[in-house]
Image (cartoon, helix red, strand yellow):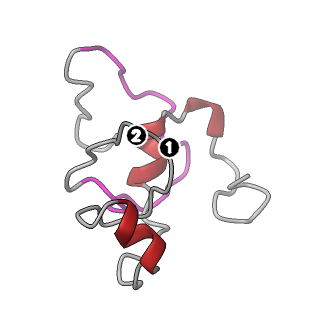
Amino acid sequence: MYKAAGILVDPVNATEFTPRDNYMLDIFDTNFTRPQACRDADPNLPYCQLVGDLRIDIGSDYSVLKPYEHMNEKCPSINPGYDRPDGC
């Protein structure tokens, strides 16, 4: 979907992305005013989650990483921390 919208361009392999990688992308408007329905659903989230009993605590990683060529192609994904080395 991101490629079709022109947000990610080749050479980026979107199949290498995890949910965390998606919300870290610096593609979201972090200064928007959340609609009332979003604030009613959860007044403390910086983004909009309308449904679901569980929420993802994304901390300060929301919309912070600019897309780059070959993004995430060689990034480790080893638990428990799933830490990202510099340049990854």
Residue lying furthest front: 40
Instruction: Name the amino acid, label 1.
Output: Met
Residue linked to disc 2: 20
- Viewer-proximal residue among 52 and 66: 52
Q: Is residue 25 magenta?
A: no
Residue linked to disc 1: 71
Q: Residue at x 26, y 35 (%)?
A: 84
Q: Residue at x 69, y 57 (%)?
A: 9
Position of 5 compared to 53: left or right? right
Relative vertical location of residue 28 with respect to residue 22 in this rendering, above or below = below
Q: Dividing the picture into quarters, in which one does residue 55 lie?
A: top left
Please tell me how crowded label 2 is: few (under 14), some (14-19), or many (20+) other residues with Cα within 10 Å.
few
Q: Residue at x 23, y 63 (%)?
A: 44
- Viewer-proximal residue among 56 and 53: 53
Give the magenta part as a residue range.
61-79
Q: In the rendered picture of this protein, how many numbered marks are placed on residues?
A: 2
Q: Residue at x 63, y 40 (%)?
A: 14
Q: Earlier in the sequence, mark 1 or mark 2?
A: 2
Relative vertical location of residue 79 with respect to residue 48 in this rendering, above or below = above
Position of 40 compared to 17: left or right? left
Q: Dividing the picture into quarters, in which one does residue 45 lie?
A: bottom left
The x, y position of residue 35, in whole percent, is 46, 79
Relative vertical location of residue 13 with respect to residue 22 in this rendering, above or below = above
Q: CA distance from mark 1 to mark 2?
A: 13 Å
Please tell me how crowded label 1 is: few (under 14), some (14-19), or many (20+) other residues with Cα within 10 Å.
some
The x, y position of residue 10, in whole percent, is 70, 51
The x, y position of residue 71, in whole percent, is 50, 43
* SS class, disc 1: loop
